[in-house]
């Protein structure tokens, strides 16, 4: 049993208790109604299934600014300076939050946790100082790093990209940042490392040598694979697809595009995908589609759990609360046998109007409960078996006779022509979409 008393190094959330499961009947806004970490669902605890992670960039650095207005978020612990001390204090407050929300993992970019200073040496030194604090806090709390990454999109040196920049010097700077970010991820025992191509894309083809840029991106990733071996980092590498924003066209467009890129450049053995819901929406796909494409290639690694706004065409990074979405997501995850190195990272931010620290709790509680429900519903649907049976039966003409022969590769066009001439017109069965939608609704 976990103790109810938690000792934190900072005290910024003293009014809020450690969030615990109280059941669906609870009306306490500071309780889980569905996420019961130690409850077993199909042989694994909910904690093990869901592997929740909190993203450092939104939670600690998301000030709530938008193109029309300044940041609104109240962060009483933050002196808003670029100092290492401020960054270290922030890190301690972050762990206070992780403990109270009962999430086991976190994710960061190098520049979220530590300031970018005047040159690379100074920035690396600052990073080391904050990493020492994170290490202490991890040891104190048992919290773990799901993945780390390098921010190769904020600084103006990356305006043309990093791995795909027209400037070899920008590439070199970016590679140096990746090297260091990999080292600190390794030092913190990170279970993975993400490459999201923040500005790896283009605004106009008029000034772009696309083929050359993609070759360079592959070079960067190959160097990372080599360096991983060199330092003995055994975490999983991920590519995170996104079709647009910040560039007009991002090279990592969607699951299928990423897989093609990895295959073309002989990188598929070294990478899996980190699929983000809002990115799927921007790509004109469902999350379910993106997950299925990745899982079919054995490359579904991790999930950035958020949601977009169907009325807006950008990455609004909202917390997921839609039970259909979490159900379909968990159906795909359970079908592939569950998450192993990956997790459900809330790459999500509270709305600009939700400016109080307490809103961080409401946001995460909602996301965690929505996924707990999705997990339970998806598990029940799979146990029930009717959906899987329907799909299996739908393809039954492939299990014997001519279908089996086609799959085995033992028939030719001429054989199929002969078969069809004898057999006559095709007899089909209904796709029963509405019936299957009703089946899902039986469980929602
Ligand atoms: C931005 C991405 C980013 C990655 C990490 O849209 O989601 O936050 O997850 O660089
Ligand atoms: Ni993301
Ligand atoms: Ni995103």
Image: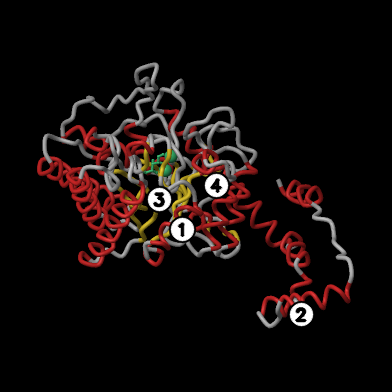
| Residue located at (41% from left, 46% from top) | 251
Q: Is residue 86 left or right of residue 316?
A: left
| Residue located at (45% from left, 62% from top) | 340
Answer yes or no: is residue 104 visible.
yes
Q: Mark 3 and mark 1: span between their CA atoms?
A: 33 Å
Dot 2 lies on which element?
A: helix
Residue position marked by numbered label 3 in the rendering = 104
Instruction: For ligand 2, tell me if the residue under mark 4 lies within 8 Å.
Output: no
State whether residue 335 is above or below residue 369: below
Query: Dot 1: few (<14), some (14–19), or many (≥20) neighbours within 10 Å?
Result: some
Report the mark closest to the observer, 2 or 3. Answer: 2
Number of the label disc, if any, that sits on residue 415: 2
Give the x, y percent position of residue 342. Answer: 43, 56
- Counting residues from the start of the chain, the first of labels 4 and 2 encountered is 4
Number of the label disc, if any, that sits on residue 35: 4
Dot 1 lies on which element?
A: helix
């Amino acid at each position: 049993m976990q103790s109810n008393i938690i000792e934190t190094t900072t005290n910024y959330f003293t009014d809020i208790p450690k969030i615990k499961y109280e059941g669906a009947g609870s009306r306490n806004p500071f309780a889980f109604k569905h996420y019961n970490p130690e409850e077993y669902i199909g042989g694994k605890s909910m904690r093990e299934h869901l592997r929740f992670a909190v993203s450092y960039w939104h939670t600690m650095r998301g000030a709530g600014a938008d193109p029309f207005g300044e940041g609104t978020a109240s962060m009483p612990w933050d002196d808003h300076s670029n100092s290492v001390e401020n960054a270290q204090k922030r890190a301690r407050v972050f762990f206070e939050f992780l403990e109270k929300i009962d999430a086991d993992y976190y994710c960061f970019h190098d520049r979220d946790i530590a300031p970018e200073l005047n040159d690379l040496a100074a920035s690396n030194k600052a990073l080391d100082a904050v990493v020492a604090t994170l290490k202490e806090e991890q040891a104190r709390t048992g919290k773990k790093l799901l993945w780390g990454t390098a921010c190769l999109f904020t600084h103006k040196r990356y305006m043309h990209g990093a791995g795909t920049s027209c400037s070899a010097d920008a590439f070199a700077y970016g590679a140096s940042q990746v090297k260091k970010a990999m080292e600190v991820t390794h030092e913190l025992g990170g279970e993975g490392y993400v490459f999201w191509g923040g500005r790896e894309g283009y605004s106009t083809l008029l000034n772009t040598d696309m083929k050359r840029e993609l070759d360079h991106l592959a070079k960067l990733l190959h160097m990372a694979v080599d360096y991983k071996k060199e330092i003995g980092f055994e975490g999983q590498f991920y590519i995170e697809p996104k079709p647009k924003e910040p560039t007009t066209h991002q090279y990592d467009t969607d699951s299928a595009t990423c897989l093609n890129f990895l295959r073309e450049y002989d990188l598929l053995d070294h990478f899996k995908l980190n699929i983000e819901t809002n990115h799927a929406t921007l790509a004109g796909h469902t999350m379910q589609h993106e997950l299925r494409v990745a899982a079919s290639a054995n490359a579904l690694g991790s999930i950035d759990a958020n949601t977009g706004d169907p009325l807006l065409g950008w990455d609004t990074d909202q917390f997921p609360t839609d039970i259909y979405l979490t159900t379909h997501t968990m159906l795909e995850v359970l079908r592939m046998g569950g998450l192993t190195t990956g997790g459900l990272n809330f790459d999500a931010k509270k709305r600009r109007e939700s400016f109080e620290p307490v809103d961080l709790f409401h946001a995460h509680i909602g996301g965690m409960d929505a996924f707990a429900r999705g997990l339970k519903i998806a598990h029940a649907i799979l146990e029930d078996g009717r959906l899987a049976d329907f799909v299996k039966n739908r393809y039954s003409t492939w299990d014997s006779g001519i279908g089996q022969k086609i799959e085995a590769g033992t028939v030719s066009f001429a054989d199929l022509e002969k078969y069809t001439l004898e057999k006559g017109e095709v007899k089909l069965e209904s796709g029963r979409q509405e019936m299957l939608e009703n089946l899902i609704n039986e469980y929602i």
